[in-house]
Amino acid sequence: MARKPIIVGNWKMNKNNAETKAFFEKVDAVAATDTATYGIGAPFTDLRTALDNAKNLIVAAENCHFEDSGAFTGEVSVPMLEELGIKWCIIGHSERRQMFGDTDETVNKKAHRLIKAGITPILCIGETEEQYDAGQSAQVIKEELKGSLAGLAPEAVAKMVIAYEPIWAIGTGKSASVEIAENCCKTVRDTVRELFGDQAADEVRIQYGGSVKPNNVVEYMAQPDIDGALIGGASLKEDSFIEIIEKTK
Ligand SMILES: O=C[C@H](O)COP(=O)(O)O
């Protein structure tokens, strides 16, 4: 079945409100198409501005907490995102797993809470360089998926986005070869099939992430199990994100 491609920029901890407005003023109109979904993951403080200026781009939060309220200093809950009108949320990014203690268990709780709110999770998984060198990529992918997706309904998994991001390729300029990216995204799809059945596997959209740029995005997108990309550095400059949209829509 045909899956609609989805390309999302992840700004990480970059851009203020004025920069967000300027970006959307320049890029949003370019993303007007039915052939693919384009969007931006932005810091919490930019979400209002992003939503106010987005007619075509989808707007994602970059994280959430799984509890609705309470003594969690510095955290933002799903109902808070809901109130803003957020419909997408990145969870389990490797930077959060490595620097802020996110685990498959907490990521799984976030996925459950987001789905309950009707917000689509963009779940990130991927192996470290050490695990890659040890030939453990497939094993890590399977374990992370099993833990992060535990207890979800197959219909919910079908609607999700899963971003395979080898940690050794993030922000390094050392992108995974097209073959490695496709093999690992296929492992993601096969694992979803094993755990949740054919419909979930055939419908879930799988992104590759890790040093995706205007000059390599098309070949990744041409792979049968790669439905899109999660893009860090190359999503920060209007011109490069516009080039990515124009080359893939
Ligand atoms: O979420 C995006 C990824 O971490 C990829 O970042 P990058 O495109 O700068 O390598």
Image: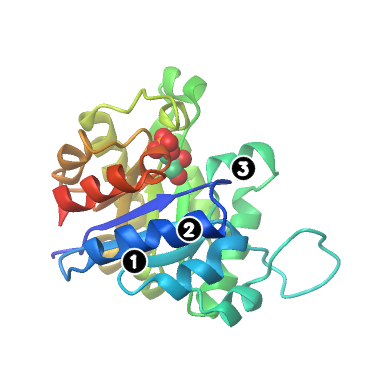
- Of the image marks 1 and 2, the number of the one nearer the N terminus: 2
State the mark number for residue 97: 3
Q: Which color scheme is applied? A: rainbow
Corner quadrant of residue 95: top right
Q: Nearer the viewer, residue 144 or 233?
A: 233
Quickly name the residue at label 1. Answer: 57
Quickly name the residue at label 2. Answer: 20
Percent x, y of residue 25: 36, 63
Tag 2: amino acid: Thr
Corner quadrant of residue 106: bottom right
Q: Residue at x 62, y 62 (%)?
A: 45
Q: Nearer the viewer, residue 28 or 190?
A: 28
Q: How far apart are marks 1 and 2 (CA)?
A: 12 Å
Tag 3: amino acid: Arg
Percent x, y of residue 212: 31, 37
Label 3 within 8 A of ligand 1 by Cβ = no
Q: How far apart are marks 1 and 3 (CA)?
A: 27 Å
Q: Nearer the viewer, residue 163 or 248?
A: 248
Of circles 2 and 3, which is in front? 2
Name above or below for residue 75 compared with residue 101. below
